[in-house]
Amino acid sequence: MIEDEDIELLLTDLFELHGYDFTSYSRASLKRRINRLYSLDKFPSFAELRYRVRSDTSYLKRFVEEITVNVTEMFRDPTFYLSLRNDILPILGTKPFIRIWHAGCSTGEEVYSMAILLKEAGLLRKSLLYATDLNPTVLEKVRRGIFPMNQMKQYSESYIASGGEMDFSDYYTANYGQAKFNGELSEKIIISTHNLVSDSSFNEFDLILCRNVLIYFDKDLQDRVLRLFDSSLGSLGYLALGSKETLKFSVVQHNYKQLNREKIWKKVV
Amino acid sequence: MEKSSVNSGVKVIAIGGSAGSLEVLFQLLPLLRDDIKVSILIVLHRRNSADSSLSELLASKCHLPLHEADDKDVIQAGHIYLAPSDYHLLVEKDHTLSLDDSEKVNYSRPSLDVTFESAADVYGPALTGIVLSGANDDGTLGLQAIKKMGGTIIVQDPETAQIPIMPQNALTHLAIDHIFSIRQMAEYLNSAELN
Ligand SMILES: C[S@@+](CC[C@H](N)C(=O)[O-])C[C@H]1O[C@@H](n2cnc3c(N)ncnc32)[C@H](O)[C@@H]1O
């Protein structure tokens, strides 16, 4: 088991040698992830792990991928997507052009879900979806738009629960256990690495989604990232967080009004 | 970890269960006095769907404030926190709760082991872990971690559990401090030594 002091050593190495700053991540979760990897990769000692992280760049890549959590799904929390459909898209639809940012998009299931909503609202052609993550490997999956076929039954149910009325299987082609989503969806997705800890604002958006990313950050970093979103949102833009996340610890909360029971806020300044 | 528990002086109880444990809580919660000072974390295996009404239902049976945990909630004395469905519930050194949607553990998210281990890390001897009725092995490793850090470990008497597998598994592998009926659990939680 890796102790707290060792975790601090690793975090310092990651930052000083490789520029990855995990020092403001929630410690409890981070410690679990590091210990999990330590036993998964069967390191004989902490010194060995530290050496690999310091000097082996391909292991560094694995390390960063594995200590971050990449779990995601399509139409996760269907009532959230229902609210996007009914409450947000009709308003965004009045704009000549729609820019959406998925920050911490992981493998892209959320982005493709959004593209489907936009398509069904007749808005996809005038929309752009920016999909960003810290992690280049997950972004490669966003680019391919291929997800495991065995998930499709559940996704189809969530799609229907989110107000979808089409045949969900029309959105992909099944092949060898994989579902490849239609090119007309991926065409509208712009993919880039972006580190919420260290990178700055890069555009102005009408809607920013950052779901189940802030839970991994401590309160100070949450506040910093929320201020980054605030400066990246146009006036009357929308901010959407994960179902257990909140603005209440951030100074920006006064600029926002929560819409309903879903974690969607409207910028009111 | 001893440092933080001494500083705060607060005792924490982590209660977890699976199949058959909701009924236990329905009986246990109303027996808790409204002036107790312990903080209670509850981890239940739940259906995937976000049935947020469970916390309201439990709150309605209980004299203490009970909430479904939000990310970074501060653990307050005399409050009860329910792990939300589909997230692991963890404890930070600054006595806040944090959530994590990483892989299921023992086919479960939330998992008892995850919460128990992380709370043990922070509260050490000031933590008591209780495993209720259930049909799998979740909780045993968590209790082990609590014991290792000097905390107290308790299981529901398998004789009284609707599904005895979970408490029985802990009993088989660990030196459990107390085997309690529901009434005994209530007496323990209300007792002066904890509050
Ligand atoms: C649990 S996933 C959330 C995926 C999706 N938003 C959802 O809710 O289903 C968290 C993602 O955040 C990314 N992440 C973690 N730290 C980040 C950072 N500093 N900057 C950008 N992305 C980050 C991880 O790589 C991971 O893909």
Image: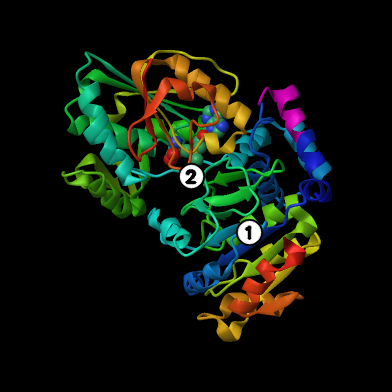
What label sits on residue B35 in the rendered view? 1
Question: Can you see residue A135?
Answer: no
Q: Are marks 1 and 2 on the same chain?
A: no
Residue positioned 47% across, 35% down in the render: A106
Residue positioned 59% across, 34% down in the render: A217
Query: Which residue is labeled 2 in the image?
Result: A71
Decide: few, some or many residues near mark 1? Use Cα within 10 Å; few <14, some 14-19, many ≥20. few
Whether the magenta-drawn stretch holds residue B121 is answered as no
Badge 2 residue CB within 8 Å of ligand 1: yes
Question: Can you see residue A246?
Answer: yes
Tell how many labels. 2
The residues bearing labels 1 and 2 have C-alpha atoms spaced at a distance of 40 Å
- In this rendered view, identify the residue nearer to me: B77 or B49: B77
Q: Which stretch appears magenta?
A: A10-20
Residue positioned 23% across, 48% down in the render: A160
Q: Chain of mark 2?
A: A
- In this rendered view, identify the residue nearer to me: A14 or B74: B74
